Amino acid sequence: MKNYFESPIEEFAEYLFASDRIGKSFSEEEKAGILSEIFSIAHNAALEESNSGIGRDPVHYIRERMQIEPVKKTVIEAYSDYVYPDNIIHLYLNRIEELYLDLKDALSSDISKDHLINIILIHEYFHYLEKNKIGDLSAKYSKKGIFGNKKFTNASEIGAFVFSRMVTGDPEKYLSNGGDR
């Protein structure tokens, strides 16, 4: 998640693309087309959801559509996850606290934990949109293998990353000045 805060949007998308086993199997031309499509889908979703009010109060906006369940302690490496078809976001509070402290040190400034949670929730909300509205990007960009289709799992993560950046703007500014863009 730190790369999310430190990298330009295109650079982090390239990193996620290259770190996925299936992502590595696409040609440069295919990769450019896929990234362009993902950016467009996420951008359009961000515009639509922003017009509906997600940026004003993400927690309230998301709670109107699904459950948010804080989990105090987990050994999972993730900060959160989205559960489909139950439409639940789990927030792993101990992992979020670790990230908060790391970012506070790395950014050398006072940051808002509430806004960090907003970024995480907005990211997971994109996965909700994938399953309930726009279609699963990981499945859309799958490849046939010997044992069936293999999903390009990071396609969904790239979409969620772009979506959250489009809604909140620059993450360092969003975290440090209370969300004023």
Image (tube, helix red, strand yellow):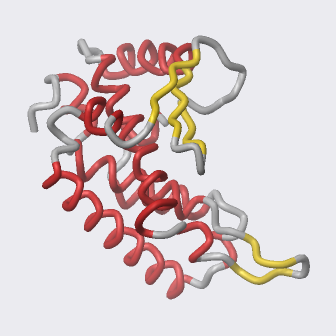
Query: Which residue is drawn at the image coordinates 49% and 20% (left, top)?
Result: 96
Image x and y of residue 168, in percent: 23, 42
Where residue 69 appears, x then y in whole percent?
Answer: 51, 24
- Nearer-the-camera pick, 143 or 18: 143
Instruction: From the viewer's side, name the closer residue of 110 and 146.
Output: 146
Return the residue found at the far bottom: 29
Left-right relation of 124 to 58: right
Instruction: Left or right? Give the position of 61 relative to 83.
Output: left
Pinpoint residue 160: horizontal percent, then vertical percent. Answer: 43, 53
Q: How many numbered discs sit on the rendered protein?
A: 0
Q: In the displayed structure, would residue 106 be above or below residue 19?
A: above
Residue at the extreme right of the image, as rendered? 147
Residue found 46% across the figure and 60% down from its top:
132
Q: In which quarter of the image is the C terminus?
A: top left
The x and y percentages for residue 94 are 56, 13
- Please report the residue visible at 62 percent of the width from the left and 71 percent of the height from the top: 139
Quadrant housing residue 26? bottom right
Residue 23, quarter of the rendered image = bottom right
**Above or below, 95 relative to 31:** above
Residue at the spot x=34%, y=63% of the render?
Answer: 42
